Image (cartoon, rainbow, N blue to C red):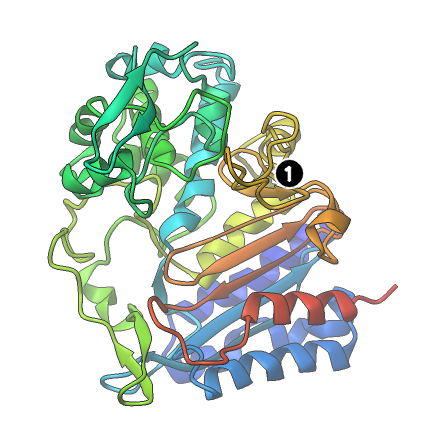
Amino acid sequence: MTRFMRNNWQQSLLAIAVGLSLSTAAQADSWPQQEVGASAAGFTEEGIQALDTAMEKIVADQDVAGMVWLLAKDGEVATFETSGLSRVDDQASMEMDSLFRIYSMTKPVTGVALMMLHEQGLWNFDDPVSKHVPELANLRIMSSYNDEGEMELVSAVREPNMRELLNHSAGFGYGLGGSDPINNKFRDSEVLASSDLDQLIEKVSDIPLLFQPGEQWSYSIAVDIQGYIVQKLSGQSFGEFLQENIFTPLDMTDTGFYVKAKDVSRFAEVHNWDAERNRLVQRPHRTDRPSYLDPERLESGGGGLVSSTHDYARFLQMLVNEGELDGQKLLSPESIRIMRTNSLRDELNLRGTATSDGQAGQGFGVDFAVIYDPEKANTPASPGTYYWAGAAGTWFWVDPVEDMFLIGMIQAQGERRPGAANMRNVSRDIIYDSLVD
C-alpha cells in the first residue's frame, strides 16, 4: 500500500466524516464513491454497476429491508451505496451513516486489542488460558452424555492455550446452538446475559469443556474471555481500552457498546420475513438482556458492538494496510499476518468436528476465518483471504493479495423470503469478475 493510496483513502473518508455532520440530503452528495469510482479503484465500470444493481435488487426483492455496502481496493473506494429501509414500521430510509448491531464482527476488534497486548509482551500463544484467567484452571471434559443430559466427565490431557482460545479449538461452549448439556448449561446459566465480564467468567468457570483442547473446532464464548483478558492485562475496562487504543486513533466515532440518545434515529432495526403476511416485518426487541440504549450493558468482546459502515471500513483498511491508517499505527505487519494465518492443527478445518471434516480449504486465525486453499474452498478469493460476519447479517472479507475488502451492512435475522439470493456469494462473484487485469 503506497502513501499516495493511503492519502487518497484519508481524503475519501474525510469527505465521509464531513458528511456525517450534514443533513441526510447533504450526505448523499458528500460520499466519496462519486469522485473516485470503479476505474480508479481497479474495476470495470460495468462490473461495479452490476454490483450496485444486484444489491439494489436484493433489497427490492425484500431479501433484506435495507443495506449499505462499500468496496475498496488499493485504498480507493470503488462504490459506497445504500438502498432500502432501516426501519419498516415507520418507513425510515437506510442512510450512509446508519448504525448497526455488528454482533460477531466485534470479534476481530477484540483480536486486534489482544494482539496489541501481545506486542507488549503481556501474553504468549502457548500460555495456558488459566495463566491469565485462573478461574478457568482444571476444567473437566465432557466425554459422553445420556438422553437425560447426564454427563460423563474426564480430566483434560492438558489445559487449553491462548492459541486455541483465539481459533475456537479450546473446547468452550457458547449456547447459541447445540442441544448437548454444555451448550444447554450456557443457556440455562444465561452466560451471554451476564451483567459484566467478571460475572461471565464466574459462570463459564462452572461449565465443562466440550472436547479435549485442540481436537475440534467449535464456535464459542472464547472471544468474550479474550475481552476479559484485555481488561485484566490492561488495567482498564474493556470498553475504555477499545476507545483509547482503537476507536479514537482510527476516528471510529460511531462505534461502541451502546447507542447514545442523540443517535437513536440512526439505529437500524432487525427484520425477518413473515410468510403469513408475505413481507418483511420488524422484530421486537429482546427483553431478556439490557437494551442497546443502556450504557451499562455487557461489554461483550464476542458480539456487543454497534458500528457504522464508515467506522468499520476504517478498521478494515487498517488491516489491509497491515496495522496502520492515516499515520496511526495500531499493530505491526507481523501481528496482522499472524492474525490472518490459519492456526488450526493439521487436518482440522473451519467447523471441523469429530464427525465432520468441516469446510475444506478454510481454517481460523485470530478471531476470523482464513481461506488457505481457495480451490478446495471453491472460491475466487486469493489465498489468505479472511472474513467474518454478524448474527444480524453484516459481513466482510479482506483479500490481502488484492489489497481489497468488501463490507455489507444489513439487519436481518430469522426467516428469509423463499428463494432469497445469497448476497455474499452474488457480490463476491461480481467483484472478482470485475477486476481489471
Report the residue at 51% width, 24% height from top: 215
Give the residue furthest to the front.
147
Res 325 seen here = no
Going by the numbered disc 1, the residue's amino acid type is Glu
Position above or below: 288 against 249: below
Give 268 or 157, whichever is nearer the viewer.
Answer: 157
| Residue 94 percent coordinates (x, y) | 39, 78
Give the residue furthest to the left.
287
73 sits left or right of 159 in the view: right
| Residue 342 percent coordinates (x, y) | 63, 33
| Residue 302 percent coordinates (x, y) | 35, 41
91 sits left or right of 315 in the view: left
Q: Which residue is mark 1?
A: 322
Report the residue at 84% width, 67% height from top: 436
Report the residue at 50% width, 66% height from top: 16
394 sits left or right of 54 in the view: left
Which element is circle 1 on? loop
Give 35 or 316, whichever is nearer the viewer.
Answer: 316
> Which quarter of the image is occupied by the C terminus?
bottom right
Q: Quadrant of residue 239?
A: top left
| Residue 167 percent coordinates (x, y) | 50, 32
79 sits left or right of 201 in the view: right
